[in-house]
Every structure is written in structure tokens, then in C-alpha cells.
Amino acid sequence: MTILIAGGGIAGLTAALSLHQIGVHCRVFETVSTPQPLGVGINLLPHAVRELSELGLHDALAETAIPTAELAYYNRHGQPIWSEPRGLQAGYNWPQFSIHRGELQLILLQAARERLGAGRILTGHHLSGWEDTGTGVRAHFIDRRTNLRFPDAHGDLLIAADGIHSAVRATLYPNEGPPIWNGAILWRGTTRGSPFLTGRSMIMAGHEFQKFVAYPISRTAADQGEAVINWIAERKFQPNHARQREDWNRPGNLADFLPQFANWRFDWLDVPAVIQAASPCFEYPMVDRDPLDRWTFGRTTLIGDAAHPMYPIGSNGASQGILDARVLAREIRRLGPTPEALAAYEAERRPATAKIVLANRANGPEQVMQLVEQRAPAGFARVEDVLTPAELEDTAAGYKRIAGFDKDALNARGPII
Ligand SMILES: Cc1cc2nc3c(=O)[nH]c(=O)nc-3n(C[C@H](O)[C@H](O)[C@H](O)COP(=O)(O)OP(=O)(O)OC[C@H]3O[C@@H](n4cnc5c(N)ncnc54)[C@H](O)[C@@H]3O)c2cc1C
């Protein structure tokens, strides 16, 4: 018995580690020849940290990540709207980690190589097609640098963890087309600087049409009294605005957004200074895809961004991919490497993630910032004059329930595996 996993990103590697944990043989096929620590910062919410901790990775994460202590919203004048404790500070049994995406991927990759054996993590292998034979799958891989074909791989199941441009999804849904853009462009970067606020704060400032997000991601820098500040500057454009195809590694141009943030100099963070000192900076359009009616076709299913790419709002992209991997492994343990296991996984995860995709389109928990901008564009003396406490708390609590990280529910439930 073996399971084939296409894609060695966050979801694919978590699936491999989870299958190994339950004693199921699997192989990972990753298109990139030499995985590099690419990307900038991401957040792992407590429910995902719990799962990685149950894979024995808590200490490796804690060595590099920042255990986020608070999430705070500000208006574009830098006035505080709302803040809430996060992770352990909020009473979760597991921290929220702000971490460099590439470092997270390498932690998972190293663990997978050590536990499964390097020979079962095949890099430079691009999935180019597959067949369901009725009793198994036969998958085809090429080396994209040479276009040479590798010998076919045979398995009981094919798990497509091949990201937002999933080849498997494109085969299953040939008419779907490219991801859907909502008009916003994100410029992302990291800047070495001074700690701000608690030193473990994640902040969002502005409103739906112009926003700045920042949080520290490096424990090493924090131990030296400094901060590696991960930041995202966002602007929303008219639908006819020209944009580049989504590519996580596309370099950004400061001139396209720095002038709009020039006077965002708050007494607790100098936004233009942070942007200017970054190296490098990347540009990415805010894209997602419509939720699908079906992920599982016989012995093949989708997980992570291949299944449910969502706007990077509310810190859910990586966390939901991790949950997918865990639920999938649980069902394979229960029902064996069968189409029934894939269907049971999908029955739980597809509706859950579809709700998050749609909640993120409605601006997720960040809607409070937009309400403040509409009601008090010039700023306010007291935030209570602009928003009721119920409006604030309902927004945050409602989103946590949808995203599955309601504190009491998470602390009370048993482990997935
Ligand atoms: C280079 C890169 C940088 C990123 N940077 C950020 C970031 O800064 N911030 C953020 O919020 N999110 C970022 N993401 C996305 C984020 O990792 C995902 O949203 C989330 O972690 C879900 O993970 P995933 O494993 O489903 O997808 P991904 O992390 O995208 O992983 C998919 C993997 O599949 C591989 N792959 C693709 N096609 C094939 C194929 N045909 N055959 C075999 N392998 C294939 C890819 O190389 C990749 O390793 C980045 C993704 C990538 C690939």
C-alpha cells in the first residue's frame, strides 16, 4: 500500500508526516528541484499549531517563530479600534505562531526526510497526469527543466496538494480558468527593525481600500532585542486595473504603493520607514477561487490551496491546509486507503473551508476597520462613539467560530488523530 502526494508545500508535507504517524506508506512528489525558504511571513492559528505539535514539531516551530500575543486593529490615522489577546495569552492551550513561510516549509521538509526517508520525498518531480485504474492510481511525472518523463508511480490514492495552480484541479475542472481577483494588490516584505507595541503584536491599520498589516516573525531577532517585521501593504483598484498573473515570487515596485502610505507615521510604527527598509518586496494580487461542489473523484482528492484557495485574510491559508491533512489521515486510518476515506474527509472539510472562503470575501474580521472608516474617516475621539462593543466582539467571535478556532471548542475537543 502506498499513497502518492503531489506537492511538497505546507499541506502536502503535513499529509506525509500525518500518514507516517499512522503507519501508512506514502511518497511526496514536488515540482521544485531544490526547495528554498520562499515566501514571507504567515500565521499558524492555535488549531493548526496543535496539529503540528501532535506531530512533534512544536519545539522546532518555537525556536524560529514568534508566539503572537495580540491582534490589534487601527484606523489609517493609527488610532486603536480593537485589540484582543491571541494564542496562549487568549487562553488557548496552543500558541499562535507568526513564522516565515519558507522556514515552516523547511521544518516540515526536514522532518519528512528524517522520518520517511529522503528517498520518499522526490523533488524535481512535476505531476503531469494520472489515471484511475479502478484499484489504484498511476501517476505521470516529468522534470520540468528537461521535460523528461520519469517512470510512472503507482499508488492506492493520489492526494493533490499542488497549490493554487493545481494541475489536478485543472484536469478535473478544465473550464475553471484562472483564480478570481478582487481588485486588491498586496505588496509583501520583511524589514529588520525595532520591536513595536508588545513585541509580539500583529497589527492591521486602515480600511478595505488601503491597509497595512505588520507582525514580527523571528525569534532569533527578538532574542537580540530586534524584530524582523513581516508587512503587507494593500491597495484596492478599479476592476479594469491591469494586474500581473499571481506569482508568490514576483518582485514588487515601491513606487506603486509607497506614496499612498507616505503619511502613515504613527507614534507606535513608522509605516513608510518600514516599507522603505525592506528587502526584497513582492507583489501578489488578492485572488481566490469559487468553492467547488466536489473534491474527490474516485481515488483522487484535493487538499490545501488546490482545494480551497482563499484570500490571505484572517490567517487561514496554511492553517486550513494543515487541518485538511490531519482529517484526511484520520479517515484513511479509519477506512483504509479507499475512495470512502477520501469521501469522508471531503464531507467534513469541504463545507468547513467553503465558509471561510466566503467569509474572507466579506472581509473577514477586518470588516470593523471598514465600518470605522465609513463612520469616522477623519478619526475619532473615542472609538465607543463609532462602534458598539457588541459590533466589535461579534465580528471577531463570529469569524473564529467559522474558522474553527473558537477557544472553548478547540480546548475541549479531542485530537483529530
Ligand atoms: C513559493 C511560495 C511562496 C508563498 N508565499 C506565501 C506568503 O508569503 N504568504 C502567504 O500567505 N502564502 C504564501 N504562499 C501560499 C501558502 O503557502 C499556502 O496558501 C498555504 O500554505 C497552503 O499550502 P499548500 O501546501 O496548499 O500550497 P503551497 O504552499 O502553495 O504548496 C504547493 C506545492 O505544490 C508544488 N507543486 C505545484 N504544482 C505541482 C505539480 N504539478 N506537481 C508537483 N508539485 C507541484 C509547489 O511547488 C508547492 O511546493 C506561498 C506559496 C508558495 C508556493
Image: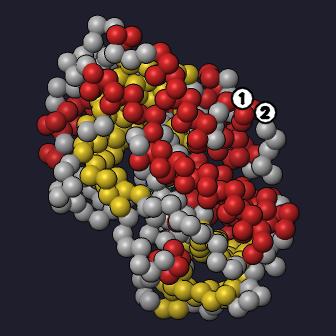
- Disc 1 crowd, CA 10 A, few/some/many (<14, 14-19, 20+): few
Which residue occupies 60% across, 69% down?
A: 295
> Mark 2 and 1 residues: CB-CB less than 8 Å, in contact?
yes
Which residue occupies 78% across, 33% down?
A: 412
Which residue occupies 46% across, 34% down?
A: 365
The image quarter containing residue 97 is top right
Front one among 377 and 103:
377
Amino acid marked by disc 1: Asp
* Mark drawn on residue 408: 1
Q: Mark 2 points at which residue?
A: 412
Q: In this view, does 16 lie to the left or right of 258?
A: right
Amino acid marked by disc 2: Ala
Q: In this view, does 136 lie to the left or right of 173?
A: right
Q: Is mark 2 on a helix, strand or loop?
A: helix
Q: Distance between the residues labelled 2 and 1?
A: 6 Å
The percent position of residue 306, horizontal first and vertical second, equals: 52, 66
The percent position of residue 379, horizontal first and vertical second, equals: 24, 16
Q: In this view, does 132 lie to the left or right of 395?
A: right
Q: In this view, does 157 lie to the left or right of 189?
A: right
